[in-house]
Image (cartoon, grey):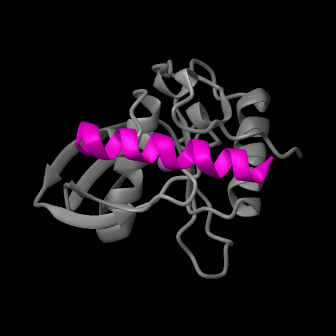
Amino acid sequence: MALLPILHYPDERLHRVAAPVGDINDRIRQLVRDMAETMYAAPGIGLAATQVDVHEQVIVIDLSETRDRLQVFINPVILERRGEAEFEEGCLSVPGIYETVTRANWIRAEAFDAQGQRFTLEADGLLAVCIQHEMDHLQGRVFVEYLSRLKQSRIVAKLKKNQRRAL
Ligand code: NI
């Protein structure tokens, strides 16, 4: 297993659109393991392959307190969405920034697991928000892009300042 470097906003590569996975093989299963390890180490509750500069449709999520309920979504599709929910979101690619985003409160999604089995799932609350946030990454979209231009430029400035401090 390996920890993968996480891209940080506004890295251009976060805007690449991920391609569907053609064959769910050992390479993809290794990617899933590495992404899970990277997410747990960060620590985070979700990670999209885009964030580790792999532009294929793979997402890992674990919302459990015990950090032992990994959920894997390969080639995810949202079939239905209902309602609205406002959540304060953060992102491993936008460290230290938390902002409120409005998304669907309930979704029905379809995806494949790491064994290549197709499944459907209904989710609400945090899981629904998390799936939508990670699926956005696969489309090259970062959550701060829902905010105003002014807020976005403030965030970029803040991240740059933090980066300089870290050096
Ligand atoms: Ni994110």
**Is residue 118 at least partly visible in the picture?**
no
Whole-percent x and y of residue 150?
27, 41
Whole-percent x and y of residue 165?
72, 52
Whole-percent x and y of residue 87?
29, 66
> Which residue: 43% across, 47% down?
155
Whole-percent x and y of residue 137?
45, 36
Q: Quadrant of residue 85?
A: bottom left
Q: Quadrant of residue 153?
A: top left
Residue toward you, 62 or 96: 96
Q: Is residue 25 above or below residue 9?
A: above
Which residue lies most toward the bottom here? 65
Instruction: Look at the image and say whether residue 150 sits in the magenta stretch.
Output: yes
Instruction: Look at the image and say whether residue 25 sits in the magenta stretch.
Output: no
Q: Is residue 120 left or right of residue 96?
A: left
> Which residue: 81% across, 46% down?
167
Please provide the residue range marked out in magenta.
146-167
Residue toward you, 60 or 108: 60
**Is residue 163 at least partly visible in the picture?**
yes
